[in-house]
Amino acid sequence: MKQTSYYGIFENEQKFYTKNLTTGSAFFNESLLRLDSVEYRYFDPTRSKFAAGLKKKMGLVFHDGDVVLYLGASHGYTVSYLSDIIGLKGIIFAVDSAYKVFRSLFHVSTLRHNVIPIYADAAKPASYARNICAVDVIYQDIAQKEQADIFDANYALYAKEGAVGILVVKARSIDVTAQPSKVTEGVKKKMLALGYTVLETKMLDPFEQDHALMIVTKGERLKKKSSTHTA
Amino acid sequence: MPTPTYYFAHVIGHFVFDENFGVVDSGEEKIRKKYPNLIDITEQNISAYKQALVALKNPHYLPLFYEQNKAAVRRALRTIANNDNYIIQTIASMDEVTKARDMLMHRLGEWCSLFYPEISKTKDILSLAVTVDAKDAVPIRQLTAHINELSDLWNAQLAYLKKVMDGYCPNMAAVAGYELAGRLITISGSLEKLSRSTSSEIQVLGAEKAFFRHLMHQTPLPKHGIIVLHPLIKRADDAKKGKAARAIAEKISIAARVDYFKGEYIGDKLRKDLEAS
């Protein structure tokens, strides 16, 4: 098991792992690996677009103690790995509005004290205006046609100066008939028009069909505090 | 000396900030009264609001964020146990019971046909015992008993559904019937959403596929969605089905609004209007 250039991500036999914050507990039947009295959780790139992005060598930089706003947390699969990465000094505000998935997200948050569940609609950011604090990263994984506008509304309210945004572009949810790469290009244009700098965009195949990951920021970029990753 | 300048109400507490957004005081709502001339921070004053959020971005507050938000979620999730969802679950369950019963009935028919190739209706099962070895009739009887139990279950669920709807949406139930009214609530998600739908939306609820096909490929607009279950539409001639659907959707939309805003019972009048037209 060796540390990768990503903070908090480890590699063993070309598979990614994170250090389990809740030793002994797996949440999604993921395989646990115990080496030298440290427990690691396997991070599956076919289940998480974030892991797929790592496989694609994208500049997905998180740090110990980061505060993250996660829109569309769903069952909390990716959330649980981010929780491993940012550690107990960090916070993830996990927003979702579907009560069917919320039970499992709530379960994740019960054992992980850095995961804070917010039962609200990401499209109405004002509805949780008094529940969260300023954030370093906004991660968006929602199936909405207006995902760029929804991201912007959240960024305007909650992003700290120079905060980074990670968008999962769901081409099929935006336009079923158009080519996914064209849809992604459209979202990119939209983000540029909204005043963002698009740092990186990549399609996620073969791990995930018709999905792209886009990294954006606004204003002056944060000084690379310990950005060990060079993609 | 920092001057108390801003007041900020948040789920983790009430804060008084100085002009540089340092925390002067925090606690319960009453701390606001301790300091004169405080400016309330709202999202409208975006620059002050964002600075307040930055001030709260402190690992020190993490346990408060955690506890208070979990409590808020618990409160919100508690409201999910409501009449809308009781209706939605009951309808779904009744469909599944029907499906299960039909499947078992089919098996029972096959099984019985071993002894009576000409049998098609399971009613004749009683005569089985005469010709069949007793031990071979046992599993068939057991299966029959379970099928009967499923029928009883279905009836009990229907009775429950009626009881819930009589209290919750009596007008809808009177105009549309229990089943259709329940299915409309299922498709739209809640009585509230249904009451906010226009009657033309109600008319094609459940025909979304045909509706979007119409928008994309200019196929004919669907005449009706799930509303077709209404006996008046079922009975109507093909040429008049669209017209009937429109009239019924209109009355259902009125009924849904009356029910949602807890108006008086006008179901009988609505139904009479409908039958007259």
Image (cartoon, helix red, strand yellow):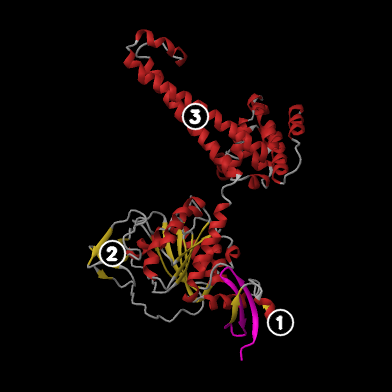
Crowd tier of the residue under label 3, counting other residues whose Cα lies within 10 Å: few below 14, some 14–19, many 20 or above: some
Q: Viewer-nearest of labels 2 and 3?
A: 2
Q: Nearer the viewer, residue A63 or B244?
A: A63
- Secondary structure found at label 2: strand
Same chain? Circles 2 and 3: no
Q: CA distance from mark 1 to mark 3?
A: 67 Å
- Residue B251, picture quadrant: top right
Query: Where is residue A202 shown, x and y percent of the image?
Result: 39, 64
- Residue B143, picture quadrant: top left
Q: Nearer the viewer, residue B16 or A93?
A: B16
Residue at the bottom extreme?
B1
Judging by the rendered image, the residue that carries numbered circle 2 is A39
Q: Main secondary structure of the magenta part?
A: strand
In the depicted structure, whether residue A76 falls above or below residue B65:
above
Judging by the rendered image, the residue that carries numbered circle 3 is B98
Q: Is residue B20 magenta?
A: yes
Crowd tier of the residue under label 2, counting other residues whose Cα lies within 10 Å: few below 14, some 14–19, many 20 or above: some
In the depicted structure, whether residue A135 falls above or below residue B185:
below
Q: Can see residue A197?
A: no
If the image is split into quadrants, where does the C terminus of chain B sit? top right
